[in-house]
């Protein structure tokens, strides 16, 4: 882990911290974390690229690095927006790392779930403009990451899909995944899609409003930068207060029930029936491959 939670920005060879140069002048900076790369050029718009092969699963380590990266950017006055994408071909993120939820201790499940919550609270509650450039499939937790951004642009490849497919794994999306989904697509679409655990191919996801626009893959980053410029043309304080007004109730709900939500997760994931479902799902993924 190359990012640290606090401390002075460093300006040296190799990996550098995102920060400000002496005299407060914003600098181009890159942070070469092991699971994501992050760069902040003079434009004040950071690009965060997931790079955790094979499928950018959200492991405890990944989630921790993600949250620390967001905290760094949030605290950096030079940074007003972040574009989130993946370096892997065909995969934005495969969602929560299922191996973190299989055969581990209660303490581990507690730590893992707290990290999932932390990532979402930081991303959904971010003051920055957040744009997801979804350049591959994005099931479950991957969909949550995209939905937590202010705007989603997806590569128009119908082989790429996105959605909250938890029901297909025999598990239930927690209330704050559901709340985020409802805020993006509305109650009726969320209700049907969640119950069926649907993964929507890109064109369908666009039709449902789960992603805001589709573009050819090679145009994704260019379009993300243009959207970002449009959002950043407004005064930050007005946009930020409006965002808070729209998202606060949903954020507050998790903050108020955080410990209870962890307890529920740990109890649920520890059940033998759930462990069995998760193991079978992992087996199915392996079989599908061979
Ligand atoms: C119990 C309480 C629950 C409370 C709620 C919990 C909320 C849960 C949220 C989640 O995010 S659960 C995870 C949901 N994710 C998925 O269903 C995605 C599963 N993966 C896929 O569909 C595919 O892997 C893919 C992402 C479409 C990529 O397909 P591709 O053909 O490119 O790769 P694969 O050969 O399938 O996978 C490569 C490798 O990676 C392993 N893997 C895939 N996804 C995950 C994952 N989410 N966690 C851990 N590992 C994953 C897969 O098994 C392969 O492993 P190996 O066979 O190479 O060892």
Image: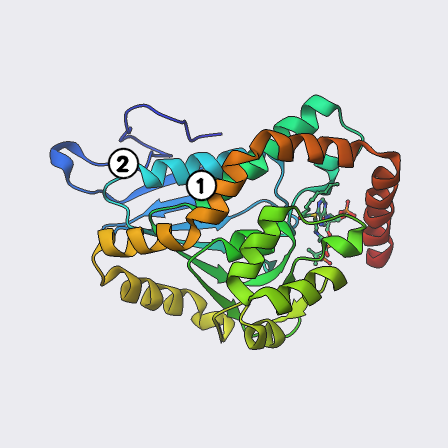
Identify the residue shown where x is 41% and y is 27%: 4
Q: Is 116 positioned to the left or the right of 265 in the image?
A: left
Asked if 32 appears above or below 45 in the picture, the reply is above
The one of 188 and 170 positioned closer to us in this rendering: 188
Asked if 276 appears above or below 289 in the picture, the reply is above
Q: Position of residue 64 (x, y in %)?
A: 52, 33
What is the number of the mark on residue 19? 2
Secondary structure of residue under mark 1: helix
Count the marks. 2
Identify the residue shown where x is 63% and y is 68%: 188
- Precedes in sequence: disc 2 or disc 1: 2
* Distance in Å between CA atoms under marks 2 and 1: 19 Å
The one of 259 and 121 positioned closer to us in this rendering: 259
Report if residue 199 is visible in the image. no
Identify the residue shown where x is 52% and y is 57%: 147
Q: Is mark 2 within 8 Å of ligand 1?
A: no
Asked if 89 appears above or below 28 in the picture, the reply is below
Q: Position of residue 17 (x, y in %)?
A: 33, 34
Q: Which residue is mark 1?
A: 122
Q: Is 18 positioned to the left or the right of 201 in the image?
A: left
Q: Position of residue 275 (x, y in %)?
A: 84, 38
């Amino acid at each position: 882990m190359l990012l640290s939670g606090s401390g002075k920005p460093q300006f040296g060879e190799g990996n550098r911290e995102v920060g400000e140069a002496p005299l407060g002048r914003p600098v181009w900076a890159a942070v070469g974390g092991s699971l994501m790369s992050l760069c902040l050029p003079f434009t004040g718009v950071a690009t965060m690229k997931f790079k955790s092969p094979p499928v950018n699963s959200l492991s405890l380590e990944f989630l921790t690095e993600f949250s620390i990266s967001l905290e760094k950017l949030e605290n950096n006055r030079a940074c007003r927006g972040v574009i989130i994408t993946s370096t892997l071909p065909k995969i934005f993120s495969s969602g929560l790392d299922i191996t973190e939820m299989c055969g581990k201790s209660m303490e581990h499940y507690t730590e893992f779930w707290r990290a999932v919550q932390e990532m979402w609270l930081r991303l959904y509650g971010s003051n920055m403009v957040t744009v997801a450039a979804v350049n591959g499939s994005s099931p479950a937790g991957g969909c949550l990451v995209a939905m937590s951004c202010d705007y989603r642009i997806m590569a128009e490849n119908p082989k790429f899909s996105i959605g909250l497919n938890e029901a297909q794994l025999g598990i239930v999306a927690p209330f704050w995944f559901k709340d985020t989904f409802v805020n993006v697509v509305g109650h009726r679409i969320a209700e049907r899609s969640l119950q069926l655990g649907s993964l929507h191919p890109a064109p369908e996801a666009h039709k449902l409003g789960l992603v805001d626009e589709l573009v050819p893959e090679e145009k994704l980053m260019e379009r993300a930068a243009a959207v970002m410029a449009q959002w950043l043309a407004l005064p930050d304080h007005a946009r930020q207060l409006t965002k808070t007004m729209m998202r606060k109730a949903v954020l507050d709900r998790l903050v108020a029930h955080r410990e209870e939500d962890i307890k529920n997760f740990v109890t649920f994931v520890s059940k033998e029936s759930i462990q069995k479902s998760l193991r079978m799902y992992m087996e199915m993924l392996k079989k599908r491959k061979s």
